[in-house]
Amino acid sequence: IRSHYTRLIDELRCAQITNEEIVERQATIHNNELELLIDEHRQRCEQINRSIQDLRVIITDWSTIEQFKQLKLKLTHLQEDIREANEIFQERLPEMKVFEFDNDDYKNINH
């Protein structure tokens, strides 16, 4: 009985170590992906901000209907850029789940 429980305890310890390694690896992968995602989003936001600054000059300067139409078109494009940047950011976040295991994770660590 003692050797049986000793073996069970050893198996539990191995399983715990395996789980900790999987979680640590997933956390590292997700942190790296999140950093890349944030950097991409930041770059898009900076580009959008530059577009807004350019539009401010046009807004104070427009005097003809044609310039107004161009301004309206640029604002529409800017809205689309903002919407797309937010959608891409939100789409990729749910992919980053911690504590999700599959058999491949166990096989990779145990072999």
Image: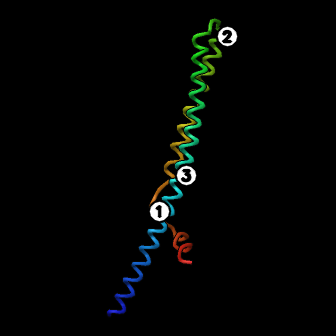
Q: Quadrant of residue 83?
A: top right
Q: Quadrant of the image for the C terminus?
A: bottom right
Which residue is label 1 attached to?
Answer: 100
Indicate the position of residue 47 as horizontal and vertical percent values: 60, 31
Q: What element carries label 1?
A: loop
Q: Which amino acid does label 2 sit on?
A: Glu
- Counting labels gives 3
Measured as percent of width and height from the top left, residue 46 is found at 57, 32
Q: Say which residue label 2 marks.
A: 66
Q: What residue type is labelled 3?
A: Glu
Up the image or down, 80 lies above or below 110; here it is above
Query: Tag 2's secondary structure?
Result: helix
Whole-number angstrom distance, CA of label 2 to CA of label 1? 55 Å
The 10 Å Cα crowd at callout 2, few under 14, some 14 to 19, many 20 or more, is few
Residue picked out by circle 3: 33
Q: Tell which tag, 1 or 3, sits nearer the viewer.
A: 3
Report the Cα–Cα distance between label 3 and label 2: 44 Å
User: As shown in the figure, which amino acid type bears the numbered disc 1?
Assistant: Glu
* Lower sequence index among marks 3 and 2: 3
